[in-house]
Image (tube, rainbow, N blue to C red):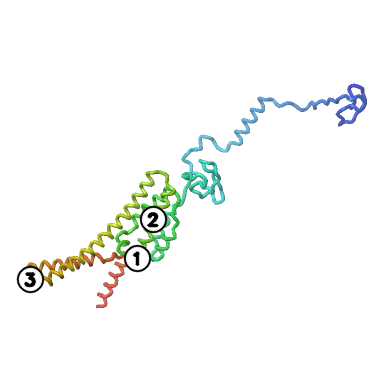
Amino acid sequence: MYCSNCGKKLDDDALFCDECGTKIKRQKPSNVQTPNVQETSVIKEEVKEVTRTEPVDEIRPEQKRVNLKEGHLHKCPNCGELINFDNVKCPTCGYEIRDREVNSSVQSLFDKVLSTEYLDKKIELIKTFPIPNTREDILEFMILAKSNFDAKYYATNKNIDSISSAWLSKIDQCYAKAKILLRDKRDLDTVEDIYSQIHKETKNIQRNKLLMIIIGFVAIFTAAICIVTFNVEGNTPLSLLFLALLAVGIVLLVFGFKKKKTNKQLEEERAAKAQKKDRR
């Protein structure tokens, strides 16, 4: 290579002439061509057509969503917080994730209780069940718990660790949690109504039982005093009235103190009676 100004021979990688300081201008290779804009756009379109895996019109909203497996993360659509795949509620803003399939823990509980034969196991399943956090599960639990709670059995066996007492304790816990989590007034009214009905029915049964016991004692005491005071003898109308009052008092006491039995207890009593008949 030679300097275009003074003609001195230079190195091939020289940028300036050592003799006169002239900047060396290098020519571009003649075989390099500038790409045509139109050709470039055509190439891009061809690349798009090749890389497209499926037509746009084949993507339909009714196609099933792909269930994310364990370890995957979601973004909360409300605040953008990263949440685990199995979260049904955003821990940051409380937004409920409704667009995924979730196994209902409530329904699973009731299925286990129904399939379990032993009473102690049923009580343990109910007592150890964690109260749900979502609106749908709270409402579902209150409705199903109400249908399984036996108010009459609880009222007559209040001091016994029964399945009804286990249901009632969970109903109270769910009601307390619903007042904290639920924001919709209609949902709160629904839970409040179910809770009030359960406790109202239980209190009415307990009150009726207490009234029967009190009236029974009063009737027996009154009949006994009248019989002694009036020295009633024979089959006089007055003696029959006092005896009827005495009988009513005894019946009321029997029903007042009577405890409701479970279906299993009734079946066991029937089986025991049948065995006694067979032995005879």
Q: Nearer the viewer, residue 45 or 139?
A: 139
Q: Nearer the viewer, residue 20 or 56?
A: 20
Label 3 and label 1: CA atoms lie apart by 45 Å
Is residue 94 found left or right of 142 in the rendered image?
right
List the residue tagged with mark 1: 159
Of mark 3 and mark 1, the one earlier in the sequence is 1
What x and y, as percent, mark residue 127? Answer: 42, 60
Label 1 and label 2: CA atoms lie apart by 17 Å
Name the kind of residue labelled 3 in the image.
Answer: Asn
Dot 1: element: loop
List the residue tagged with mark 2: 172
Q: Which quadrant of the rendered structure holds the C terminus?
A: bottom left
Q: Are marks 3 and 2 in contact (CB under 8 Å)?
A: no
Is residue 35 found left or right of 103 in the rendered image?
right
Report how many numbered discs are placed on residues in the image: 3
Name the kind of residue labelled 2 in the image.
Answer: Asp
List the residue tagged with mark 3: 235
Crowding at dot 2, Cα within 10 Å, few <14 / some 14-19 / many 20+, comes out as: some
Is residue 96 found left or right of 162 in the rendered image?
right
Quarter occupied by residue 207: bottom left
Dot 3: element: loop
Of mark 1 and mark 2, the one earlier in the sequence is 1
Q: Residue furthest front?
A: 229
Q: Which quadrant of the rendered structure holds the N terminus?
A: top right
What x and y, as percent, mark residue 210? Answer: 26, 62
Q: Nearer the viewer, residue 1 or 68?
A: 68
The answer to whether residue 6 is above or below residue 111 is above
